[in-house]
Amino acid sequence: MSTPYLIRFVQHFVTITKHRILVCKGCFKIGLYYQGLTHDLSKYSPDEFLVGVKYYQGTRSPNNAEREDIGYSSAWLHHKGRNKHHYEYWIDYNTRGEMPGEDVLIPVEMPDRYVAEMVMDRIAASKVYKGKEYKDSDSLDYFLGGIETAPMHPNTRKKLYRYLKILAKYGEDKTCRLIKYELKHGRYIPKSKRSESD
Ligand SMILES: [Zn+2]
């Protein structure tokens, strides 16, 4: 960590702001204006920002550097508890005895508008991570890499997977138009009818 503190402070600010601008553009494309403007705002709070500066490396998430240092990421715990576009926000515990072994942690289904914001978040993250090498299939590849372990509600996983497959196959513009349409009308367009709305 030889980079001076002030430089890392500025670099971290620029990194998170660039990400927010990209996600904001994506959210505007799908009609989620408020979510676009407020995406990841908690990253500017001292609990997240100062940890980000401390562990800033430029090539990967400072959260992972914090994990290696102290065993967990305090910045991530703060972040996922406040940002509904992360499926980790939606983990509760079950007290109704529906699950074998009571009080187990359960993933709650995410509202569609946060699934949509999550898609925009993943596109933006892949773009920054991959740079010139970015492809529409990157978000799908990342999802498939973590599919076994992510504690996501089955319906949330299904919706996310579907959008990422459409993104990989048809590209960003068509995917955004479809998401916007589905958020507005609250239903899915069957594959056979999809071309009519394009
Ligand atoms: Zn976030």
Image: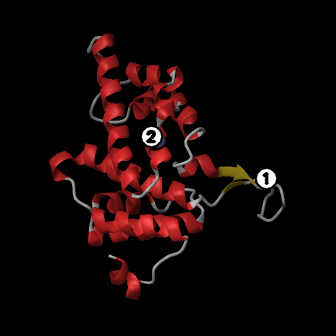
What is the x, y in percent for residue 191? Answer: 40, 84
What is the x, y in percent for residue 47? Answer: 53, 23
Residue that badge 1 annotates: 103
Instruction: Tell me: residue 190, above or below residue 17.
Output: below
What is the x, y in percent for residue 75? Answer: 51, 30
Which mark, residue 122? none
Whether disc 1's CB lies below 8 Å from ligand 1 is answered no
**Pointers 1 and 2 in contact (C-beta within 8 Å):** no
Say which element carries label 2. Answer: helix
| Dot 1 or dot 2, earlier in sequence | 2
What is the x, y in percent for residue 126? Answer: 30, 50
In front here: 116 or 32?
32
> How dense is the environment of label 2, judged by Cα within 10 Å: few (below 14), some, or many (20 and up)?
some
Residue that badge 2 annotates: 37
Q: Quadrant of the N terminus?
A: top left
Instruction: Tell me: residue 2, above or below residue 182.
Output: above
